[in-house]
Image (cartoon, rainbow, N blue to C red):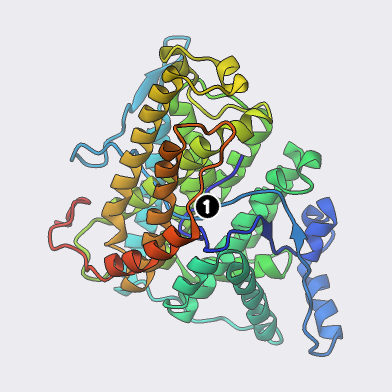
Amino acid sequence: MSVALLWIVTPSIEVSNSVGFFNSVRDGNRLLDPSISISRYWGSIRAKKGRKEKWNSCSVSTDLKFSGVGGSGLDSGSNFPVLSSMVANPAGELAVSSEQKVYDVVLKQAALVKKQLRSSGDLDVKPDIVLPGTLSLLSEAYDRCGEVCAEYAKTFYLGTLLMTPERRRAIWAIYVWCRRTDELVDGPNASHITPTALDRWESRLEDLFRGRPFDMLDAALSDTVTKFPVDIQPFKDMIEGMRMDLRKSRYKNFDELYLYCYYVAGTVGLMSVPVMGIAPDSQATTEGVYNAALALGIANQLTNILRDVGEDARRGRVYLPQDELTQAGLSDEDIFAGKVTDKWRNFMKNQIKRARMFFDEAEKGVTELSAASRWPVWASLLLYRQILDEIEANDYNNFTQRAYVSKAKKLLALPIAYTKSLVPPSRTSSLLTKA
């Protein structure tokens, strides 16, 4: 299943299905082997007496699109409403809904940012703490992250060049970690990945946040999380999304699907907002910006799902709410048959309408970002939303036709996105105006 990793990579003018990866990935589970420590990586580079370490790339079959963030997308004007804060389980007991679980994470992330604002008055990054002999190695790790972003996320990479060097490098580091994580279940060695391997990857993540990175690429992210108010929970949640892909191929309702979309896409928005920065003159609450970021991730992932129905069906997967299929008079068998009928068209119209509602919610937050961050995010939103238009243009045939945005339309969207990025935050924000 393609994953939308938000606010990190927009659909590039030339979309590639390859991603730069490193020698450790080529060796399968070697990437997860705790016996290969960062001291071995750094020691080997020191032995080369300054010669630049080379990382190779490997071709993968994923079709990742990195973009934005999300929320319920069905805001009625209240304080970030939860669609259904409590639901009944089969035993008749009340359980917290997916929207409430995700909103709890949003509140935690927003609290971290507000805490730093109270203590420092701004989201300025912390100064580098340089250990002897490590500065050049850390710089090299960041440079490699930038090279991967430049090669496989061209449009977004250009946007990151408008950011300050610290924010730019941090975004690159987050991108690389997210890509590596997705590769575990969607890459060339995915058939060999087990829940235990994901547990080991999560253990590496925890060490990374404790300042004990495993390799140079981990070191770039480890450095990033010391400088920005980034919490570990969204990273853990993304790994949980990978676990879900290993064990689950059906979603009984949208509540379940929403949680999956948050895990594999919405999380990136929560990781990235502290780095992207909120405009100093924004009147929106921090929670409001995070919620809009979450909405873009959900919107992008729903778009991926609708675009890839046929591709997923050939893998035995159906990422559509089962109860809504039933209400439309459809079943998994209809999807596997791949025939466009009036029932399917009506079903798809409703699914596209929901995705667009999330995009509409996301738009409210883009203007609230720091000026240097708006253009790549606007480009991501506009380009990805056009995929829904292409599904409609294909008469809802997402079984055998892949909806894609032409190069000409992509080029046209870029100046539009840039123009939108020049619009400053409103004096009366729709995202919970500050008191």
Quadrant that contains the N terminus: top right
Percent of width and height locating residue 415: 35, 69
Q: Is residue 225 left or right of residue 292?
A: right
Above-or-below relation of 169 to 239: below
Above-or-below relation of 120 to 311: below
Q: Toward which corner of the image does residue 132 lie, by quadrant?
A: bottom right
Q: Residues within 10 Å of mark 1 (few under 14, many from 20)?
A: many
Q: Is residue 284 left or right of residue 325?
A: left
Q: Toward which corner of the image does residue 15 lie, by quadrant?
A: bottom right
Percent of width and height locating residue 221: 59, 66
Res. 277 visible in picture: no
Residue at left offset 58%, top offset 26%:
318
Percent of width and height locating residue 268: 49, 53
Q: Secondary structure at mark 1?
A: loop
Q: Residue furthest bottom?
A: 49
Q: Which residue is label 1 attached to?
A: 5
Q: How many marks?
A: 1
Residue at left offset 14%, top offset 56%:
435
Task: Name the kind of residue labelled 1 in the image.
Answer: Leu
Residue closer to the observer: 357 or 134: 357
Residue closer to the observer: 76 or 413: 413
Residue closer to the observer: 330 or 424: 330
Q: Toward which corner of the image does residue 172 lie, by quadrant?
A: bottom right
Residue at left offset 63%, top offset 28%:
313
Residue closer to the observer: 235 or 168: 168
Percent of width and height locating residue 375: 37, 67
Res. 25 visible in picture: yes
Residue at left offset 69%, top offset 45%:
186
